[in-house]
Amino acid sequence: MLRFIAASACVASAAAHGSMVTPISRNAVDHAEVGCDRSTDSCSAKAVGNGCVNVTHPGQPCHNGQADFWYSQGCFIGCPTCDHLSGRRQTDLCGLGKKATLPDYARSTNRNATRFSDLDIYQHNPWSAPGSAPVADPCGLAGGSPWAWNRGEAGNYVNTTHAVHGQKGSTLPRMPTGVQWKIGGEAEVTWQVRNNHGGGYSYRLCPADVLLSEECFQDHPLDFVANRSGLLFADGSHQLIQPVHVNVGTEPSGSTWARIPVAPTKLGPMCIAGPNDDPNAPHSCAAKNNPKDDCGCTQCPQTPGSDCSRCSNCYTTPGFAPYMHEGQPVSGVGPVVGIEDAVRVPADLAPGKYVLGFRYDCEATAQVWSNCADIELIQ
């Protein structure tokens, strides 16, 4: 059984918002006043604690604020920048021809589509080449766009005295957590996924006294401790899992990323054309050659009773949120509300204050979710 720090997680009824829970991130700057509203899939200063549970002590208020509303969208592999608009488009937006590098075993959705075929509609999204898509800010962008107004994607950031929509996460003030990691040792991190768009994630470090940049974080990627990965449930129970890690085709070269262990079966009918879909684009969800059967765009069937036997690696346990690991049936009670990891602290880093970066690259959308937390490395 895992022995992790008590974590708070926001649980929403919607089906990729992701945020770091422990250590608490700078992105939770408004944690004392902002809660999650389950009915609207948003956060509001008028909804303190509404719809949130502390996964160790059920029923207690959530204290993670709007940490899962800091992200970049319209970010495609091979492109130099994000356009902040095209989170749901399935295309090579900048036309530079960057190819997917993710091994097939690490794909999280649309796994039955042959790579680079017309049915491989997600091949230009961030998880197709982990770490290579640009970001608007390495610590996320409040509400996912730099403009003063909100856009869709359930990213309606509520302005507070602490942060406002469009603010860069790297400009947030330090938030001392008291968390100390021993150099050369192992450390624990917990994060939660609010809306699941498939993909995977990594943890990185950057010294706190330098400019927080994607380049700085990529200089210090962290490795996972494979036998300490797990799922956290609404009743506070834990379940060790067999994680899916990948260090081939990642950026920086050789860095290790983890596939999200909760199956994206609640993606919904992603093949329905959205307002930004171009039916003339070969990989658009609006394209006429897009698969129409239950197994086409999503990992598992969307219609009860559908035959999806040819879809690979679809794991579902009645009464629980679906998950994607090759372990034993989950024994927890209630939905998966947290994902727990252990990472190795590099032995060659100097003691001092650092920023822990969490980056979650989506596969079914052109989005990257980011959080940053303050920690200290000690001898």
Image (tube, rainbow, N blue to C red):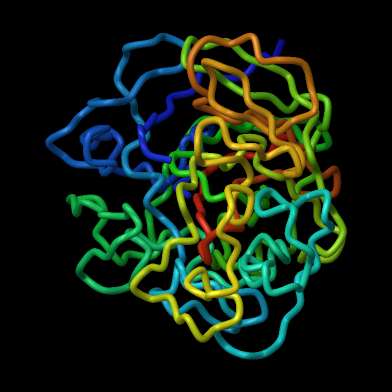
Which image quadrant for residue 326? top right
**Image: 192 above or below 356:** above
Residue pictured at 38% horizontal, 31% vertical? 10
Residue in front for this viewpoint, 128 or 249: 128
Residue pictured at 56% horizontal, 30% vertical? 305
Residue pictured at 54% horizontal, 83% vertical? 281
**Residue positioned most to the bottom:** 95
**Where does residue 276 sit, x and y in percent of width and height?**
38, 76
**Where does residue 350 sit, x and y in percent of width and height?**
76, 49
Residue in front for this viewpoint, 363 or 216: 363
Does 60 sit left or right of 195 as displayed?
left
**Residue positioned most to the left:** 46
Does 58 sit left or right of 7 as displayed?
left
Q: Quadrant of the C terminus?
A: top right
**Where does residue 332 sit, x and y in percent of width and height?**
58, 11
**Image: 96 above or below 200:** below
Residue pictured at 69% horizontal, 67% vertical? 120
Q: Quadrant of the N terminus?
A: top right
**Image: 259 above or below 190:** below
Residue in front for this viewpoint, 146 or 153: 153
